């Protein structure tokens, strides 16, 4: 039902307008002064305002200005008993939809009201149609994306736009849990401080809340102005695939979702389906990157993984280290025990390396008896410790001991770090490779770091 506000200080005309409009089935609110009219406009939304032009204190032009300020498409009909051509032109120029002189003709007045509301209905339908078309286009882009990183960005952008906030972050599932993937409108460090509260909120039972949650942050009011957020959990097939977090705007509360809940539910369904498709595609693609012998990633995956991690460095200002490892004198194993035994040694070596690093790190069998490890969020000092730990572990290990063999080997490890030693993946790989061969030239069984000044 369309809602109309009547602002009229003359009781006779106030009741007349009210009776005429209610008789047509409209929902009508009345204000007996301009001040009361402003109060109504600040509290409620109206499809049309009928106001007297001349009132003591706050007049009809003030009502017109406030109504258009609240909603630029709002219609206002002016009525007055003291009319002249200049006042009518002035009101119409400033946005009034129509102008009536008391005593009014009821039929003409109701016709003007009906025209205003019909035009409003058509405009609303056009806006809804444009909104639905835009939502459809966004959902098509999401549904057609198979690149997980790109898909996560599209989902994050779509939800923050629909919610109506310019600040937020998104976390998506990795092998070790939900991980910060993108931040918008705030510093990364500020967003990171909110992660623990978000994860705690997600772990709570909330059977009465559907599709979105709200959270308040303790100690709000800092320079960032982050006090609360709307959470959109991305839950699919019993697992938490991610969460979109939309922060409040500085100095403001969270927006009311209202009618947008339907759009958010639609986006949620499309996003979960797209994440499932992208995950299946990624799994199938990963099979192309698996080394059959060791079960590790193969050389083809090195470029993919390193490209991804280099992008993360640029986005989050983190650190990265690349290790190149070559097994010393491995040819003697093949010559002495045969290639089948040598293959089992290479597989066991892969297992050792996998156990020597974190789950988030990437271990690759580069080819033959060479291996590569990508250590994410790793400083040069930590990279040195990891490399030395691997070297020492290999040197003390007896390969295929369960099969009765006593095969002992050493390895040479070269490593280089980003951004300290190199800023591109090509330089990083080249330096780590050169460092490894430098170590072999020094007598093997050692760890060498290679930089631009080495």
Image (cartoon, rainbow, N blue to C red):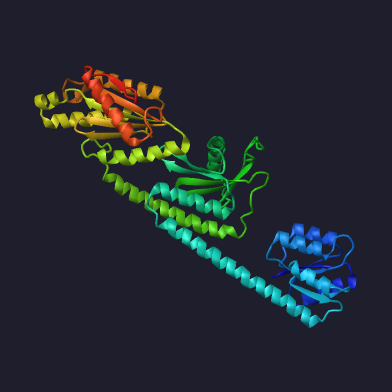
Counting from the top left corner in percent of width and height, residue 312 is at 42, 38
The quadrant holding residue 339 is top left
Left of 136 or right of it: where is 247? Answer: right
User: What number of labels is visible?
Assistant: 0
Counting from the top left corner in percent of width and height, residue 356 is at 33, 26
Counting from the top left corner in percent of width and height, residue 34 is at 84, 62
Observer able to see residue 397: no
Left of 86 or right of it: where is 139? Answer: left
Observer able to see residue 330: yes
Left of 16 or right of it: where is 68? Answer: left
Quadrant where the C terminus lies? top left
* Residue at left offset 30%, top offset 49%: 284
In the rendered image, the vertical position of residue 78 relative to residue 410, given as above or below: below
The quadrant holding residue 322 is top left
In the rendered image, the vertical position of residue 128 relative to residue 230, given as above or below: below
In the rendered image, the vertical position of residue 22 relative to residue 401, given as above or below: below
Q: Which residue lies furthest to the front in this view?
A: 86
* Residue at left offset 62%, top offset 38%: 224
Counting from the top left corner in percent of width and height, residue 207 is at 56, 49
Camera-side residue of 87 and 250: 87
Quadrant where the N terminus lies? bottom right
């Amino acid at each position: 039902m369309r809602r109309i506000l009547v602002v009229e200080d003359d009781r006779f005309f106030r009741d007349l307008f009210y009776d005429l409009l209610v008789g047509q089935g409209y929902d009508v609110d009345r204000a007996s002064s301009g001040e009361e009219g402003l109060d109504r406009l600040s509290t409620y939304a109206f499809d049309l305002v009928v106001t007297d032009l001349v009132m003591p204190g706050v007049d009809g032009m003030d009502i017109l200005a406030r109504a258009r300020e609240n909603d630029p498409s709002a219609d206002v009909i002016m009525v007055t008993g003291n009319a002249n051509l200049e006042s009518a032109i002035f009101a119409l120029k400033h946005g009034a939809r129509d102008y009536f002189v008391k005593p009014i003709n009821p039929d003409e007045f109701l016709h003007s009201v009906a025209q205003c509301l019909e035009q409003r209905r058509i405009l609303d339908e056009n806006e809804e149609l444009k909104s639905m078309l835009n939502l459809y286009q966004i959902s098509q882009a999401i549904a057609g994306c198979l690149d997980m990183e790109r898909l996560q960005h599209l989902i994050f952008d779509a939800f923050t736009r629909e919610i109506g906030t310019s600040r937020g972050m998104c976390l998506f599932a990795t092998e070790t849990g939900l991980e910060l993937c993108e931040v918008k409108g705030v510093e990364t460090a500020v967003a990171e401080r909110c992660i623990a509260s978000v994860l705690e909120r997600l772990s709570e039972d909330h059977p009465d809340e559907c599709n979105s949650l709200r959270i308040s942050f303790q100690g709000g009011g800092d320079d960032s102005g982050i006090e609360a957020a709307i959470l959109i959990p991305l839950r699919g097939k019993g697992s938490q695939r991610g969460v979109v977090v939309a922060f409040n705007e500085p100095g403001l509360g969270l927006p009311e979702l209202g009618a947008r809940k339907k759009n958010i539910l639609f986006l949620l369904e499309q996003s979960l389906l797209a994440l499932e498709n992208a995950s299946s595609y990624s799994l199938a693609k990963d099979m192309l990157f698996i080394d059959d012998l060791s079960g590790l990633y193969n050389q083809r995956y090195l470029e993919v993984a390193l490209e991804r991690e280099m992008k993360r460095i640029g986005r989050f200002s983190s650190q990265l280290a690349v290790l190149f490892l070559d097994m010393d004198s491995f040819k003697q194993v093949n010559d002495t025990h045969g290639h089948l035994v040598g293959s089992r040694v290479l597989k066991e070596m892969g297992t050792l390396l996998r156990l020597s690093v974190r789950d988030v790190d990437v271990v690759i069998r580069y080819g033959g008896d060479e291996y590569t490890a990508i250590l994410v969020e790793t400083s040069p000092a930590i990279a040195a410790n990891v490399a030395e730990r691997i070297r020492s572990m290999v040197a003390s290990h007896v390969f295929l001991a369960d099969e009765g063999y006593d095969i002992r080997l050493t390895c040479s490890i070269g490593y280089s770090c980003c951004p300290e030693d190199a800023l591109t993946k090509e330089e990083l790989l080249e330096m780590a490779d050169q460092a490894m061969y430098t170590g072999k030239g020094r007598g093997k069984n050692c760890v060498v770091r290679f930089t631009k000044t080495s």
